[in-house]
Image (cartoon, rainbow, N blue to C red):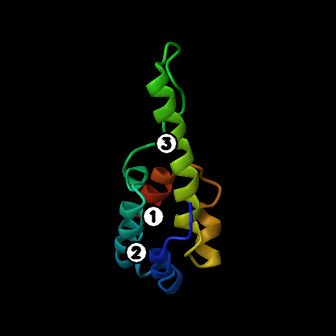
Amino acid sequence: MSKNPLTTILEVNIFNGTNYNDWLRNLRIILDFENQAYVLDRFLPRALPERSTHQERLTFDKWHEDNRKVHSIVLVPMTNDIKKQYDMHDDVQLIMLRMS
């Protein structure tokens, strides 16, 4: 992902534990622009069915790639103390549930 100029919104609006709604609104703006906001709202699929189609595999792989990218976008604009609470989780949806 190339540098999105919108990410500067999060660089100056770091999540500090008291500004969740503002931080989430800014995060959604960025992820909507990147077509990755779905990662916030749905759990990461852990496995594909045995007889998955090619399209299902592509979708699965894209979801995991987007989750990995969004994971970084979510964690970077946090104070270090807060970041330590969530950086061990690999599923962005799980992080969002624990934060809300």
Residue type at the position of mark 1: Met
**Residue 45 visible in rendering:** yes
Quadrant location of residue 82?
A: bottom right
C-alpha separation, residue under disc 1 versus residue under disc 2: 8 Å
Residue 42 or 63: which is nearer the viewer?
A: 63
Residue type at the position of mark 3: Trp
Looking at the image, is mark 1 or mark 2 earlier in the sequence?
2
Label 2 CA crowd tier, 10 Å (few <14, some 14–19, many 20+)? some
Does 68 appear above or below 31? above
The residue identified by callout 3 is 63
**Residue 16 visible in rendering:** no
Residue type at the position of mark 2: Tyr
Badge 1 vs badge 2, beta-carbon distance below 8 Å: yes
Looking at the image, is mark 3 or mark 1 earlier in the sequence?
3
Secondary structure of the residue carrying tag 1 is helix
C-alpha separation, residue under disc 3 versus residue under disc 2: 25 Å
The residue identified by callout 1 is 99
The residue identified by callout 2 is 20
Quadrant location of residue 24?
A: bottom left
